[in-house]
Amino acid sequence: MRIRLSPSTRQTIANVFAHLDYKRLESVYCYEGGDEFWQVKREPCRRLGTKVAEALVPRLPRDGRSLYIGAGVAELPVLIAEAVDRERQVEPYNLRQAEVVVLNRACRDLPVCFLARDAASAQGRFDHLWMVSVLNDPERFPHLSPLSYGQANPVTFNPIEFQKERRIVQTIVNRCLAKLTIPCLITTSTEEVVWIADWCHRHKVPYRVSRIHYPTALVGDPICFIKLG
C-alpha cells in the first residue's frame, strides 16, 4: 500500500534537507570524513525516506500519535509526512543534543519538534511506534549486535555481557510497547522483529509482520511494519 505524497509535502521535505547544517552533522555521524559521507548519503536519505513515508502514511489514521525512538535525519521525511499529510502528532526522541539542535532549526516552521531525552519519559498513549536500528545499535550493544546480524565470533563472544545487554533491550521494549494502544502499528528493522515478537508472545498480543521490506540509506537495515492486535 503506497500513496504519493502531495507536491507541497514533498517540497517541504526537500526544503528541510536543503536547510540542514550538514557541517554540524558531520561530527554527529562520523569520526572523520563527514563531508564526504553527507555528499553521498544526503539525497538517498531523502529519497528512500520519502518512499517509506509513502508506504507508512496510508496505514495510519488521522489525528493519532506516533512515538519515534532515536529519530534523526533519516526519519525527517516520515515525520513531516505524518505531521503534514496525515495531521498526526509526532514525538521524536533523540539523545544526541547536537543533532537535535540542527534538526529543530531546520524544522522550526513545522509541527515537528525533536526532544533530547529518553523516550521513556513520553507521556500518554500512541498508536504508532517507530523503533528502527535502536535495539541492535553496535555502539550501544557491542555484544548483542553481532549476534543480531549473524556475525558473532564464537571465540570472542562474551555471554555474560550479552545477557546484560539483552536485559537492557528487553527493558526498552517493555517500556515503549507499554505506551501503545492496541491495535497499533510498529515500524522497525527486520533484525529487531524478534524483540517485538517476543513481547507479543509474552503479553499474548496477536501480531502480523509485513512481508514487504523498505531499504534505508544510513544504517542499511531494511524496514518493515508490524501490526499489533
Image: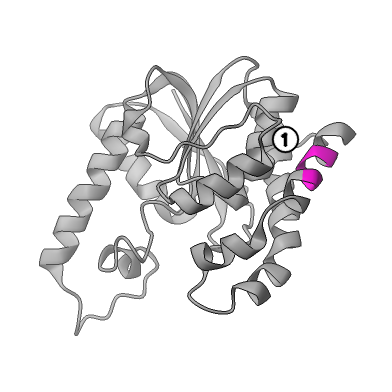
Residue situated in front as seen by the camera: 198 or 223: 223
According to the picture, the residue beneath numbered tag 1 turns out to be: 1
In this view of the protein, can residue 37 be seen by the observer? yes
Instruction: Locate residue 163, reporting x and y percent.
Output: 15, 58
Q: Quadrant of residue 116?
A: top left
Image quarter in which the N terminus is found? top right
The overriding secondary structure of the stretch rendered in magenta is helix
Image: magenta residue range: 11-15
Left or right for 77, reference 28 = right
Residue situated in front as seen by the camera: 3 or 74: 74
Which residue is drawn at the image coordinates 53% and 21% (left, top)? 65
Left or right for 58, reference 145 = right
Image quarter in which the C terminus is found? top left
Residue situated in front as seen by the camera: 184 or 217: 217
In this view of the protein, can residue 213 be seen by the observer? no
Tally the marks. 1
What amino acid does circle 1 point to? Met
Q: Quadrant of residue 220?
A: bottom right
Which residue is drawn at the image coordinates 80% and 47% (left, top)? 14
> With respect to residue 175, does 89 lie above or below?
above
> With respect to residue 8, does 148 lie above or below?
below
Q: Which secondary structure lies at badge 1?
A: loop
| Residue 36 painted magenta | no
Identity of the residue furthest to the bottom in this view? 155
Q: Which colour scheme appears in the figure?
A: one colour
Which residue is drawn at the image coordinates 58% and 61% (left, top)? 24
Left or right for 192, reference 143 = right
